Amino acid sequence: MIEYFYFLRKVPLIGSLGRFILKKYDAICFRRRKRCFLSCGNEILQKAKNALDSENVLFWLDYGTLLGAYREHDFIKHDFDLDIGLWLKDAEIAKKAMLKNGFELIRCFQIKNDERRVEYCFAYKGVSIDLFFYELEGNFTLGHFFTSIIGISKLNYPNKCGVCEVRFPYTGFRQMLFKDSLYNVPAETDKYLSAHYGSTFMQPDPNFSESEASNIKYYSLEEKEGIAFIYRNI
């Protein structure tokens, strides 16, 4: 049905109707996801921890989840999903552990012709959790994430996406108490967060955009092309 409205956007006269309906639909989905996150976010993070710990898979809080835990000792007010980092070598066992413990794989991304570089998104009780995978390169962790491509039609190219490379300073890990549980976080958390969010990361900025981050390299489709497998939207 939603794909039908993407098509309507391109049709003269009724294209504005398709855009209007999609905008309303996105707003409804966002409010629903936000409600689920506020009520179940901590439960889902703990469930993911239990699943990965059961297989001795090392993971750490990442991106917005790490920022909230470090700066606010809570989830960020405008956030609506969970983010964790893992080593790329553990991608397959982490996937199996999450599925075994009741999580649903709703999205999978990979680099064309380099399928081992992936990103997974799982869901449980309406809350999504993104798994970002890294490799160690000197004093940095090197990972990839995937983005939509401006100007590319979701209808004509539903599985094509952009590829970004991200680097964080690596100094090992430490444990931090968050929501009554101990989680791994980068040892020098302030440096890790500064690399991505800037030196003013302790000041909340609900309008922060990934495009502002200096530790990200964006690839053209000719350089690296991403493939998206969308199994379900929440």
Image: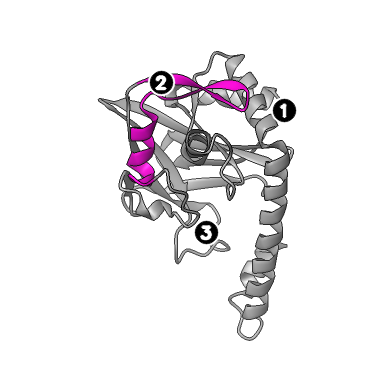
Mark 3 in CB contact with mark 2 (< 8 angstroms) = no
Q: Of the residues tagged 2 and 1, which is closer to the observer?
A: 2
* Whole-percent x, y for residue 150 in the image: 44, 63
- Occupied quadrant, residue 31: bottom right
Please indicate, yes or no, whether residue 90 appears anywhere in the rendered image. yes
Marks 3 and 2, Cα distance to the nearest angstrom? 40 Å
Q: From the viewer's perspective, is residue 199 above or below residue 152?
A: above
> Which amino acid type is marked by label 3?
Tyr
The residue most toward the bottom is 13
Which sits earlier in the primary sequence, circle 3 or circle 2? 3
Marks 2 and 1, Cα distance to the nearest angstrom? 28 Å
Which sits earlier in the primary sequence, circle 3 or circle 1? 1
Residue at mark 3: 157
In the rendered view of the protein, which quadrant contains the N terminus?
A: bottom right
Q: Does the magenta run of residues contain 34? A: no
Q: Of the residues tagged 3 and 1, which is closer to the observer?
A: 1
* Whole-percent x, y for residue 211 in the image: 38, 54
Q: Residue at point 64% right, 19% down?
A: 50
Q: Residue at point 58% right, 63% down?
A: 155
Label disc, if present, on residue 173 of the rendered structure: 2
Q: Does the magenta run of residues contain 176? A: yes
10 Å neighbourhood of mark 1: few (<14), some, or many (≥20)? some
Q: Residue at point 37% right, 43% down?
A: 196
Magenta residues (range): 172-200
Which sits earlier in the primary sequence, circle 2 or circle 1? 1
* Whole-percent x, y for residue 185 in the image: 45, 26
Q: From the viewer's perspective, is residue 137 above or below residue 112?
A: above
Residue at mark 1: 102
